[in-house]
Structures are given as C-alpha cells and as structure tokens.
C-alpha cells in the first residue's frame, strides 16, 4: 500500500473555487497541472496524458481544454495534466532518455530513485493520492497503430462497476479489462482503492481527428458519469460498447506479443483489424546481412488490435497484438 502519511505540498481541498495552474516539482522532476474547483463539493477527477512521451492525443485534448474549458456548474475538482512525462515528451520518445525507464512500469515510484521513479512517486503521492477517480490517456505511440480501446484493471469490489461505467463513457472505442499488472499508474490507483481507467488511441506518431473527437466525447461523458457535471434529465446517451474481460495477465500486456526474432526489416502481411488464425503467417522479418527472413506466425486466433508500423526492428520488439474480439 502507498504511504498515506506523505505530506501534500498542494492540498486541493484548500483551493478557492475557480481555475488554477500549478507546477508540481520535487528533486529535479515536475509537471504542470490545470485545476478547476467547483463551488459545490464533489468528486476529484484526475486525467493525464503523456505517461509515455510519444503519445500525443491525450496531451492535445487536455491542453486544448486547459485553454478553453470554463464550466459554470462544476462540482468538486477536475485536474488535467496534459504532459506528465516531460522528459520523454520533449525527447519525442516513449521513455525519458535520462534513465531509459518506462514510467508505466515504475509506479508507485521512489522518492530517491532515478528521474522516472521520482516522477512516479511525485504523481502518486501529490495527485493520485487526492483523486477519487482517475483516467490515463495513452496511445500506440510513434512506432505502432491500434484499434482504440478503453480499459481497466478488474477489481473484486464495487469499484469494478464504477470503472466499467467510466470506461463505457469512451463509447467510440471497445473495452478491454484485465487483471492487475504491476508498475502502472492504474496499479497505483488500484492500491489506493481509486476507480481508474486508461484509454488507448491510434498513435502512429500523430493525432487523428476522429480520435480527438472520440476522446472529447468520452471526457464530457466521464465528467457527468463521475459527478463533476450534472447528468442531463434524459440520462447519459452512450453507445453500447463491445467488452472483453480477460483473466490472462499476458493478454493485454502489449509489449510481449509476437516479438521480432531478430533485427531487420519488418514486412507485415496481416493488417490492423484483420482476423487471423493461430499458426498463420502474419508477417516476416528480413535480415539485413543475408537474403534470409523469418516468418512471424500468429500465436493465437484473434483480431489484430495493434501492430508495428515502424519497419526497422530490433530483436524482441513486439510486432503484433491479437485479441479474441
Ligand atoms: Zn502509453
């Protein structure tokens, strides 16, 4: 469990109603937060982008909201952190090159650890600790492309239902829920008993307009679902979301599937969204120093929900993720 005794440097419940900006810093790491305080008490919703530095959909939407969103009927508190991992973001990389560590594997972090560990600790103790609901906006990043989904870590308690309802707000996407994996922002939220979801957008190095629209629609619904904004009298009108709940810890662990057998040029043959059978050839990796190549075969039957777009690969780079959806 996280240390509840950690001193808050910026207690949200002492903030005046209105719009605030605050930079959270400690031991050489930091991030910017935009904070809206309502006149009425209510939930504390925390949303961030760029846990990974090469994922731009979340930062784009949240930065836009910071500039333009001025609600008059807000309850509770909304905190948006467009770019959590500034070191990685400014390097245009998934991880901060200062230590090469993956922020989504370092939670709850360490006060005296490396930069990425310190950042995880700062976010966990100063913001996550104050949240009642949490959403982490991801995407496939610059090297990958995926079929957008929202998801959460399944819980044995009532929080599971809350998370399911939160994920369902992103109704342009399908939903993928799975068991606990350590080190994630969501695992830190899980340990703190905070209902939490993540969202994955297309990625491929940019921001698709349809993803931004879907995220915006989702965030608007989420604010109503958790209680920061009033629900319209007719209720929240959401499209029915396709749901996949797995008990397999490896299924939604994206970086382990179909690793490149060696370095080389990747030639995919199965496209995003395609349904493939176990054992089917779905691509190959061509060696640079010979005319040989190695066929990549599907390790299960399912739909291609993520694939690598960057054609240069190193041994072990994930090439495909399949899901039975
Ligand atoms: Zn990510």
Image (spheres, rainbow, N blue to C red):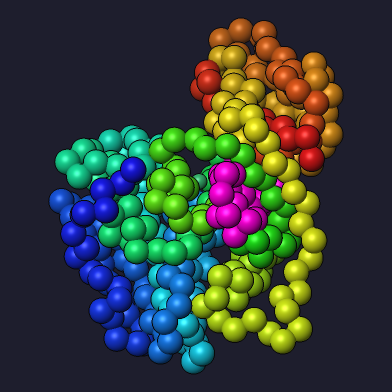
Residue situated furthest front in the rendering: 157
**Residue drawn 15% across the image and 51% down it:** 27
Left or right: 140, with 4 as reference point: right
Quick check: 283 above or below 308?
A: above
**Residue drawn 25% across the image and 70% down it:** 11
**Residue drawn 36% across the image and 87% down it:** 18
Q: Nearer the viewer, residue 315 or 150?
A: 150
Q: Nearer the viewer, residue 232 or 173?
A: 232
Left or right: 52, with 99 as reference point: right
Q: Write down the quadrant of residue 140 in the picture.
A: top right
**Residue drawn 78% across the image and 51% down it:** 242
Quadrant of the drawing holding the N terminus: top left
Quadrant of the drawing holding the C terminus: top right
Q: Write down the quadrant of residue 224 in the picture.
A: bottom right
Query: In the rendered image, is residue 181 in sight?
Result: yes
Q: Which residues are magenta?
A: 144-164
Quick check: 311 above or below 123?
A: above
Q: Write down the quadrant of residue 115 in the picture.
A: top left
Quick check: 126 above or below 205?
A: below
**Position in image of residue 162 (x %, y %):** 59, 60
């Amino acid at each position: 469990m996280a240390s509840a005794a950690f001193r808050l440097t910026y207690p949200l419940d002492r903030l005046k109603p209105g719009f605030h900006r605050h930079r959270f810093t400690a031991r050489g790491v930091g991030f910017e937060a935009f904070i809206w305080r309502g006149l009425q008490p209510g939930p504390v919703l925390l949303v961030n982008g760029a846990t990974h530095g090469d994922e731009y959909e979340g930062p784009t939407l949240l930065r836009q909201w910071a500039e333009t969103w001025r609600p008059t009927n807000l309850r509770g508190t909304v905190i948006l952190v467009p770019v959590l991992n500034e070191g990685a973001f400014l390097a245009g990389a998934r991880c901060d090159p200062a230590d090469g560590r993956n922020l989504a594997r370092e939670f709850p972090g360490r006060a005296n650890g490396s930069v990425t560990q310190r950042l995880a600790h700062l976010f966990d103790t100063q913001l996550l600790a104050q949240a009642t609901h949490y959403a982490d906006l991801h995407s496939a990043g610059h090297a990958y492309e995926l079929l957008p989904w929202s998801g959460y870590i399944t819980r044995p308690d009532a929080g599971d239902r809350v998370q399911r309802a939160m994920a369902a707000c992103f109704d342009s996407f399908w939903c993928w829920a799975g068991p606990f994996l350590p080190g994630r922002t969501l695992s830190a939220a899980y340990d703190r008993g905070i209902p939490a979801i993540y969202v994955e957008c297309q990625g491929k190095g940019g921001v698709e307009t349809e993803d931004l629209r879907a995220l915006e629609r989702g965030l608007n619904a989420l604010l109503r679902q958790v209680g920061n904004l009033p629900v319209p009298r007719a209720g929240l009108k959401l499209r029915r979301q396709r749901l996949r709940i797995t008990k397999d810890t490896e299924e939604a662990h994206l970086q382990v599937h179909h690793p490149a057998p060696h370095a080389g040029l990747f030639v995919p043959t199965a496209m995003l969204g395609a349904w493939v059978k176990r054992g089917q050839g779905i691509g190959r990796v061509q060696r640079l120093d010979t005319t040989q190549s190695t066929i990549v075969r599907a390790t299960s039957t399912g739909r291609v929900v993520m694939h690598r777009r960057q054609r240069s690969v190193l041994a072990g780079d994930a090439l495909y993720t399949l899901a039975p959806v």
